[in-house]
Amino acid sequence: MAEWKEALENRKFRIEFAITFFLLVCVLTVLANFLNFIEAREGVSLNDPVLNLFEPVDLTWLTFGLIYISLFVALYFFLKKPILLITAVQSYVLLIIFRIIAMYIVPLNPPVKMIPLSDPFIEFFGTGQLLTKDLFFSGHTTTLFLFFLLTEKKLLRGFFLIATGVVAISVLLQHVHYSIDVFCAPFFAYCSFVIVKSVSKNYT
């Protein structure tokens, strides 16, 4: 609480905090409408050599179990450190912007044998319909890898890295994503993190 008290006494931090969360609301709103758009848009179906190696397996519970456990753990630690929280939210905002751009310029139809992964959070911010075309790149994999990048504690970094790997494999085994969606995910997370850290460093 001492860190928050000190941070909130800083006018610059208060302004950055307000702007950051305003931007978060804005990009989530844009994302909601954009997801509706891509679901109605026709895309391209890929012949994925990796997915062709196996039949899909329903791993929904494992995937969301890891995702939401990771989210709660990340929030628990990020909320203790105001600067880290701001960095995390800003990185996530940039990540969403990257996803919107990537999904717009890479229109894809879902894998033929996909077992749909019903995400209650994303569907809540959409129309409530099942989303299948939010493909390139994998938001689940990217978010968990972003947690790994943001965390300094060795044990937590190990947990988030393992969670990233398990979720990445799970969405492939379930044919929720093409392999390119998953393989590219860490790159976008890294770019978001580095850009935010670089801008923050130069700004301060």
Image: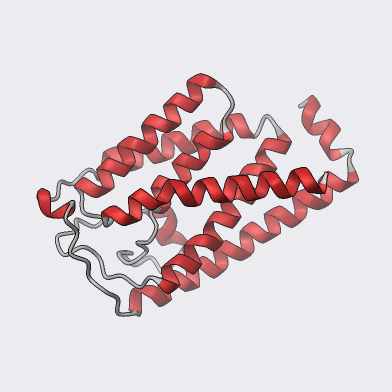
Query: Where's residue 20, x and y in %?
Result: 71, 54
Specify whether residue 117 is in view. no
Residue at 35 percent across and 61 percent down: it is: 135
Q: Quadrant of residue 29?
A: bottom right
Q: How is the image coloured?
A: secondary structure
Q: Is residue 98 left or right of residue 122?
A: right
Q: Taking 174 as reference, is 107 above or below it?
A: below
Q: Taking 201 as reference, is 158 above or below it?
A: above
Viewer-nearest residue: 135 or 81: 135
User: Considering the image in quadrants, where does the C terminus appear?
Assistant: top right
Viewer-nearest residue: 33 or 108: 108
Q: Is residue 154 left or right of residue 105?
A: right
Viewer-nearest residue: 120 or 144: 144
Residue at 44 percent across and 25 percent down: it is: 158
User: Considering the image in quadrants, where does the N terminus appear?
Assistant: top right
Residue at 21 percent across and 54 percent down: it is: 175
Residue at 34 percent across and 42 percent down: it is: 64
Query: Where's residue 62, x and y in %?
Result: 28, 38
Tag count: 0
Query: Where's residue 77, x and y in %?
Result: 60, 29
Viewer-nearest residue: 43 or 3: 43
Q: Taking 157 as reference, is 131 above or below it?
A: below
Q: Which residue occupies the extreme top position in the image?
A: 155
